[in-house]
Image: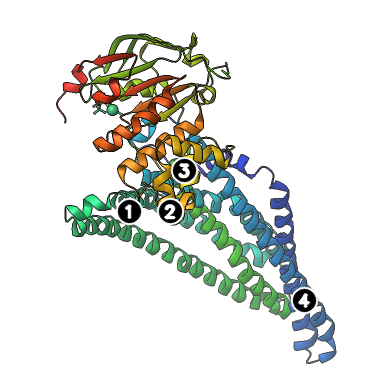
Amino acid sequence: MPGTALSARAVFRRFWPFTRGDRRWLAVSSVLLVGAAACDAYAVSLFAKIVDNALRSGDISGFWRPAATWVGVATLSSFLVFGGTYLTERTGERFLLRLRTKVFAHLHRQPPGFFESRRPGDLIARLTDDVDTVERFVGSGVVQVITALFSVVFFAGYALYLSWELALAAFVVVPLFALVTRKFAQHINRRSREQRALNGDITAILEESLANVTVVQSCNRQPAESARLRSAGLRMLATNLSIARLSGLYAPVVHLAQTVSVLAVIGLGAWEIASGRISLGGVLAFAAILSSLYAPVQQLGQLRVMASAAATGSERIIELLDAQSPLVDGPRSLPRARGLIRMQSVDFRYADTQSPVLEGFTIEIHPGELLAITGASGAGKSTIAKLLLRFYDPSAGTITLDGVDLRDLTLASLRSNIALVSQQTQMFHTTIYDNIAFGSPSVTYDNVVNAAVQADAHDFITALPEGYETIIGQHGHGLSGGQRQRLAIARAVVADTPILVLDEPTASLDAASADRLLGPLRRLASGRTTILITHDQRLTAHADRVLTLLATPAALRPLQ
Ligand SMILES: Nc1ncnc2c1ncn2[C@@H]1O[C@H](COP(=O)(O)OP(=O)(O)OP(=O)(O)O)[C@@H](O)[C@H]1O
Ligand SMILES: [Mg+2]
């Protein structure tokens, strides 16, 4: 991935808005955890008291009071820690939910062209693992930083109060610690980028390979596919091990610096005790403080390191969030169209291609007309359908519906006027009923059954053991191509839109089934403006008009 790493501040600024609604809880959990840290610092002072008043003098009477207080403080601290960590987790999870939903919704606003250059698996990885890394930094990370900072302040403040000489001696290692953390963070940052990208690769391989399982098996490519996954896995392994080495080294290095500073303090402490400036309890408390300081300081360092991992995950999410769809919503909402479609001198070419698919294409389709479009494969028939649904905008010329430029309409109102039965039927992993009702969630059961009857699908559906409640696979597994096609037609019938676009509706049907579909299609088309893309002579025979598209240079372009 190109570009420089995002700073922790930039990541923070970008994702902080996703904590909206939960900031109160972030504050509450911070207060609880800071309270727990204060309890811990207080416990150290009780320890010093016990050493000086009971242990040194061997007088048990000096033990009970501080010991009882210590138990009370420890109990309070446990409750605070429980409340604080649970609330942190809760806000973190809610942050995750909000961010993922937002990125997903944003992806759904992108035109099909956006997805053509991207692998679904990589997008899935961004919506799962990358979103996670951001949450760990911005969601729960905030509370950890606040708590760790306060812990440092409490313990360091107490250390200074006990003996500023010892404290200064102990703090000499702080710049060294900062330097070490910085170096580690830089190295881990570089590896994290590779790790995030490889994670996307692996999910993409899994997704693609499993989605194409039939091709893989029919071509005997299972070993090759496993090898492909293994090779990406090996790269991931190397990267992860390198990260593990770095973070594995980090803790011992910091620990070593910590040990040196504790020993220096104890040495210095012996001298201070001799000169009567501090008690033994004071020195022991001091050593305990330094050990307690170790945890939050190391946590801060680790958060710094984690921030670099979050930065790379964030880059991958920001890239999606910053994608601007070229299809801007128009201002007008069209309730129910009459169905007059005009394409005027339309030029269109797909991005990154040389030759235009359509050049100066002009046509007027009247309300209620059934227009059949035929022509060579690659001539641009499906492209016309996509332009009408505004999956793309023409590079020149205009398309109007009822006299209104499509670009002046809201995408939602345009598309609610058109039902599309596309060349590749698309199904969801749910019941047949839900698949038919997909575009029209408020229809009744009778509407769905009627639509299935009209689409000649009712008989095969009721022959299935679960009828309309049969769950079909995501790609319509369990159904034949023709059955899927009929479900797609039923989906269009239910939608009851004034405009209908059918792209090769009989392509996967045998002659008898195609004949059976003629009636339903005619019933469906009557009273609607219908664009019927087909090579089927029996269908074109019923059209009011037949348009034959000539192959364009794009269609004849040699495949690369
Ligand atoms: N997403 C795309 N990106 C780039 N080129 C595309 C894209 N989709 C289609 N094309 C090209 O545009 C031309 C028209 O494609 P289109 O799908 O409209 O053809 P068609 O007439 O529907 O063909 P068929 O009868 O095979 O379905 C083809 O040459 C195709 O290679
Ligand atoms: Mg096509």
- Asked whether residue 9 is in view, the answer is no
The kind of residue on which mark 1 rests is Leu
Labels 2 and 3 touching (C-beta < 8 A): no
Q: Nearer the viewer, residue 201 or 168?
A: 201
Residue of label 4: 46
Mark 4 is surrounded, within 10 Å at the Cα level, by few (under 14), some (14 to 19) or many (20 or more) other residues, namely many
Element carrying mark 1: helix
Tell me the kind of residue under disc 3: Asn
Ligand 1 lies in which image quarter? top left
Secondary structure beneath dot 2 equals helix
Q: Nearer the viewer, residue 494 or 35?
A: 494
In percent of the image, x 45 and y 31: which residue is there? 110
Gap in angstroms between the C-alphas marked 2 and 3? 54 Å
Q: Are marks 3 and 4 in contact (CB under 8 Å)?
A: no
Whether residue 216 sits left or right of residue 397 in the image: it is left
Relative vertical location of residue 65 with respect to residue 369 in this rendering, above or below = below
Is the CB–ligand 2 distance for label 3 below 8 Å? no
- Viewer-side residue, 36 vs 120: 120
Q: Identify the mark nearer the N-term, 2 or 3.
A: 2
Image spot of residue 246 (x, y percent): 40, 61
x, y percent for residue 96: 56, 49
Circles 1 and 3: CB atoms closer than 8 Å:
no
Q: Is mark 2 within 8 Å of ligand 1?
A: no
